[in-house]
Image (cartoon, helix red, strand yellow):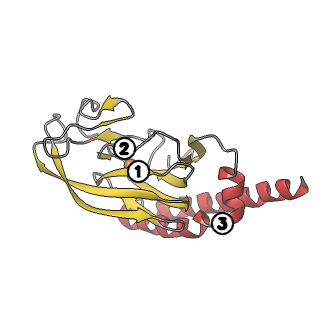
C-alpha cells in the first residue's frame, strides 16, 4: 500500500513537471515550434513507469480521462485507455486546435490524409491517405491545426493526448474517396456545421 501511495505521488510529480514545462514552452511560443517542443518534452513521460501506473495502471476504465487543464493557456492533458469495439476513427482534424498523441502502452495505428477535392467547411471534402504509421510506446506525433488524421488504438493500449484547448475539438473530414465509412455508430459526414474560428 505504501508502494502504491509512493507511485501515485511519483506519477503526479511527473505530470506536474510536464505541465509546468508545457506552460513555459507554450508561453514562449504557442505556435508550431512550441508545439513541437512540447511533443519532445512529452516523450520521456510516455514510458515513465510511475506516470503510467498512477494514471493508466491496471483497472483504469476504458476511454478518455482528463488529467489536467491549464486555467490560463487552456492546453489539456488526457490519458486514453483503448476500448473494445472502438475501431478506427474517421479522418478528422481538431478544428482550430492542435493535438499531440503520445503512446504509453501497446500501440495505435495512425493515418494521415489530405483533401483532394471539395471543402472541409461545407461537407463536400473528399480525402485520400498520404501515409500510415504505428505509434509504439515512447512515440509521439504532433498534429498541427488542420492536419487530417485517423487513429486506430488497440484494445487496452494507453496513449496521452494533449489538446490545444479545453474545447477539445474533433471535426470529421471526409469521406475517403467515394467510400462512406462509419465509426462509433455515426456517419462521419455528420460533421459539425460551421467554418473555422
Ligand atoms: Fe485526432
Q: Residue at x 65, y 51 (%)?
A: 56
Q: Quadrant of residue 112?
A: bottom left
Judge from the rendering whether residue 34 lies leftward or rightward of residue 44; answer left or right: left
Q: Position of residue 154 (x, y in %)?
A: 48, 52
Identify the mark nearer the N-term, 2 or 3: 3
In the foreground, 115 or 95: 115
What residue is drawn where x is 26% and y is 38%? 181
Q: Position of residue 94 (x, y in %)?
A: 35, 45
Residue 83, x across and y down, in percent: 53, 42
Query: Which residue is disc 1 drawn over?
Result: 152
The answer to whether the beta carbon of the residue marked 2 is less than 8 Å from any atom of ligand 1 is yes
Q: Nearer the viewer, residue 184 or 74?
A: 184
Disc 3, SS? loop
Q: Quadrant of the C terminus?
A: top left
Q: Residues within 10 Å of mark 2 (few under 14, many from 20)?
A: some
43 in relation to 19, above or below = below
Residue at 19% from the left image edge and 38% from the top image edge: 121
Per the rendering, the mark at residue 48 is 3
- Look at the picture and state if 152 lies above or below 24: above
Residue drawn 60% across the image and 65% down it: 45
Residue 28 as seen in the image, left or right of residue 20: left
Earlier in the chain: of badge 1 and badge 2, it is 2
Q: Which numbered dot is residue 89?
A: 2
Q: Earlier in the sequence, mark 3 or mark 1?
A: 3
- Distance Cα–Cα, label 2 vs label 3: 27 Å
Image quadrant in which you'd find residue 65: top right
Residue located farthest toward the left when viewing the structure as drawn: 117
Mark 1–mark 2 CB contact (< 8 Å): yes
CB of residue at label 1: within 8 Å of ligand 1?
no
Residues packed near mark 3 inside 10 Å, few (<14), some (14 to 19) or many (20 plus)? some
Q: Nearer the viewer, residue 30 or 186?
A: 186
Q: Nearer the viewer, mark 2 or mark 3?
A: 2
Amino acid at each position: 500500500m505504501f508502494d502504491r501511495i509512493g507511485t501515485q505521488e511519483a506519477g503526479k510529480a511527473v505530470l506536474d513537471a510536464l505541465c509546468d514545462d508545457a506552460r513555459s514552452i507554450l508561453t514562449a511560443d504557442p505556435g508550431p515550434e512550441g508545439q513541437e517542443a512540447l511533443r519532445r518534452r512529452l516523450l520521456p513521460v510516455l514510458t515513465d513507469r510511475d506516470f503510467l501506473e498512477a494514471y493508466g495502471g491496471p483497472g483504469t476504465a476504458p476511454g478518455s480521462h482528463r488529467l489536467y487543464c491549464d486555467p490560463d493557456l487552456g492546453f489539456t492533458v488526457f490519458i486514453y485507455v483503448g476500448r473494445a469495439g472502438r475501431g478506427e476513427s474517421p479522418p478528422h482534424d481538431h478544428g482550430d486546435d492542435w493535438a499531440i498523441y503520445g503512446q504509453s502502452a501497446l500501440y495505435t495505428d495512425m493515418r494521415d490524409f489530405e483533401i483532394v477535392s471539395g471543402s472541409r467547411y461545407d461537407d463536400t471534402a473528399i480525402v485520400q491517405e498520404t501515409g500510415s504509421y504505428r505509434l509504439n510506446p515512447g512515440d509521439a506525433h504532433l498534429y498541427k491545426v488542420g492536419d487530417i488524421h485517423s487513429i486506430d488504438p488497440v484494445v487496452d493500449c494507453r496513449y496521452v493526448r494533449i489538446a490545444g484547448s479545453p474545447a477539445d475539438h474533433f471535426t470529421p473530414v471526409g469521406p475517403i474517396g467515394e467510400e462512406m465509412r462509419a465509426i462509433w455508430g455515426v456517419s462521419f459526414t455528420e460533421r459539425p456545421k460551421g467554418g473555422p474560428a
